[in-house]
Image (spheres, rainbow, N blue to C red):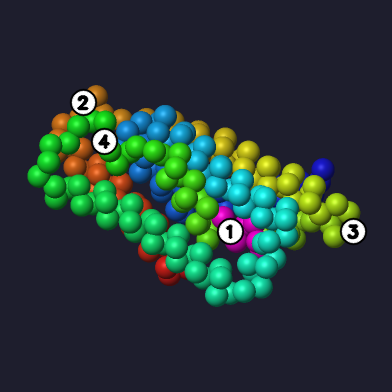
């Protein structure tokens, strides 16, 4: 149990560190509400569930062994974030009338899933940090799954809580077209910042 507690204490600061996942959730809350942020959190947790299966199957070690493959996945993640940011920023310069129920805030689960699946930061946690807490002398698959579920559980609690906090900060009593455009631009800017952060790190 001490190993699992140490792992939790290790990844909690990483979860709270601003990165693609957190910035994506903030963009969804800004674009809609806390519920959208929570739905995005479910998508993110689902994306990391895929990583959990890869770790359990030992595929993570294969990916780490081939830097080209890891870099390919890394740049796919960056490209996806840039796509979302350009889509949001583009709506600022659109002449179309915008409504509060924006199309850019739809399918937060799907977008959250791919954001986590292609997030190099999350991949590094799974492929570099998590294996260090596994005892090779016992059942590595079970240990890997337990550690993965601890990570996913912490993400769910932290990001759902942050969705509520973000909504409190960004909520408006009434949304007009001009404010909506500012929110679109702000959301797109956050995702652009996330992509830039990944490029330089």
Mark 1–mark 4 distance (CA, rounded to whole Å):
31 Å
Percent x, y for residue 42? Answer: 52, 37
Mark 1 crowdedness (10 Å alpha carbons): few <14, some 14-19, many ≥20: many
Is 118 colored magenta in this rendering? no
The answer to whether residue 198 is left or right of residue 45 is left
The mark closer to the camera, 3 or 2, is 3
Residue under pointer 1:
123
Residue at the extreme right: 137
Percent x, y for residue 192? Answer: 33, 57
Residue under pointer 2:
174
Establish if 184 lies above or below 201: above
- The boundaries of the magenta stretch are 122-128
Quadrant in which residue 170 is drawn: top left
Residue under pointer 4:
102
- Which sits earlier in the primary sequence, circle 2 or circle 1? 1
- Which element is circle 2 on? loop
Mark 3–mark 1 distance (CA, rounded to whole Å):
24 Å
- Which sits earlier in the primary sequence, circle 3 or circle 1? 1
- Which element is circle 1 on? helix
Which residue is rendered at x = 47% and y = 33% of the image?
A: 38
Percent x, y for residue 68? Answer: 55, 75
Mark 2 crowdedness (10 Å alpha carbons): few <14, some 14-19, many ≥20: few
Is 124 colored magenta in this rendering? yes
Residue at the extreme top: 173
Residue under pointer 3:
137
Which residue is rendered at x = 52% and y = 53% of the image?
A: 117
- Quadrant assignment for the N terminus: top right
């Amino acid at each position: 149990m001490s190993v699992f507690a140490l792992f939790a204490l290790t990844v909690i600061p990483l979860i709270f560190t601003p990165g693609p996942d957190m910035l994506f959730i903030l963009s969804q809350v800004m674009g809609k509400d806390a519920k959208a942020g929570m739905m995005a959190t479910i998508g993110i947790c689902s994306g990391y569930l895929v990583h959990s299966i890869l770790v359990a199957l030992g595929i993570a070690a294969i990916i780490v062994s081939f830097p080209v493959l890891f870099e390919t996945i890394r740049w796919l993640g960056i490209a996806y974030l840039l796509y979302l940011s350009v889509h949001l920023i583009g709506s600022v310069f659109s002449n179309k009338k915008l409504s509060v129920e924006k199309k850019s805030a739809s399918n937060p689960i799907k977008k959250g899933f791919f954001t986590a699946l292609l997030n190099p930061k999350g991949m590094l946690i799974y492929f570099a940090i998590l294996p260090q807490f596994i005892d090779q002398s016992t059942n590595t698959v079970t240990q890997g799954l337990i550690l993965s579920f601890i990570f996913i559980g912490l993400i769910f609690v932290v990001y759902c809580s942050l969705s509520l906090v973000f909504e409190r900060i960004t909520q408006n009593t009434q949304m007009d077209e001009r404010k909506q455009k500012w929110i679109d631009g702000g959301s797109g800017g956050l995702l652009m910042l996330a992509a830039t952060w990944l490029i330089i790190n």
